[in-house]
Amino acid sequence: MQVTEHALFPTRLVTIQFDAPGLNEEVARRFATGDEFAGDFDMHPDSQNLLVLADRWPAIGRLRTMFLDGLRVWLRGERAFGELATEMVLFSNYAARGEFTLVHNHEADVAGIYYVTTAEYDRPALVVADPAGEYDYFAAEDGVLVLHDPRFNANLGALGSADYAKVYPRPGLMLIFPGFLWHSVTPHLGEFRRLAISANFRLRSSRPSNAETWSVVVDKS
């Protein structure tokens, strides 16, 4: 397992390259043949949690462990030590030709992506924009993840700045980053279905608290 940490924007991004061809093949085959993923299936975090399949689909249980390992690496880098109660939702991005993802962030403390099936690239997995180089922010490359600097108008600095980074995904690559980080995916250009599994983590400290907890109901009347 090869782990690399990157300080972007400044925002901590952890990339982990797993050697898991068997896992990727199993997940891709299940998505291609499973009735629950047929037709125009695409899933979002508020529709279904893939973890409900973990008991009867070992590959999902393994992905859960891999994501939790990645989360620990990210939290350690943030010096967030101790025990944290962690809620996790796994969902997929199963893209057909021409499909893309608009700029968005996640309703989560930390987010993760694991790539199962991707295009092939002749570039490194992570390319940080060079303020003195070519500005290729708008290039419509095949299924590339674009990470956007969360600082407002970061590209307007007089000295220039690396206000975006691009991830050229490959099977087995995992990304862990804060949920607030805006990102998008360029159109998928292949004839196959591009498959990525995403994770949303909500974290709560397990340390004792003197706060009172209330359930507040707001109706329309």
Image (cartoon, rainbow, N blue to C red):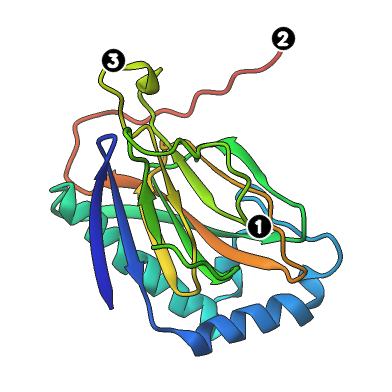
The amino acid pointed to by label 2 is: Ser
Badge nearest the viewer, 1 or 2: 1
Q: Nearer the viewer, residue 133 or 206?
A: 133
- Which quadrant would the N terminus be assigned to in this image? bottom left
Q: Which badge, 2 or 3, comes first in the chain's sequence?
A: 3
Q: Give the distance between the C-alpha atoms of the residues marked 1 and 3, in whole angstroms.
A: 46 Å
Badge nearest the viewer, 1 or 3: 3
Which residue ends up furthest to the right in the rendered image? 39
Residue beneath disc 3: 158
Q: Would you place residue 71 above or below residue 116 in this image?
A: above
Q: Which mark is residue 221?
A: 2
- Which quadrant would the C terminus be assigned to in this image? top right
Q: Is residue 112 left or right of residue 16?
A: right
Q: Give the distance between the C-alpha atoms of the residues marked 2 and 3, in whole angstroms.
A: 52 Å
Q: Dot 1 surroundings within 10 Å: few (below 14), some, or many (20 or more)?
A: few
Q: Nearer the viewer, residue 197 or 156?
A: 156
Q: Nearer the viewer, residue 101 or 76?
A: 101
The amino acid pointed to by label 3 is: Ala
Callout 2 secondary element: loop
Residue 200 image position (x, y, % from top left): 47, 51
Q: Which badge, 1 or 3, comes first in the chain's sequence?
A: 1
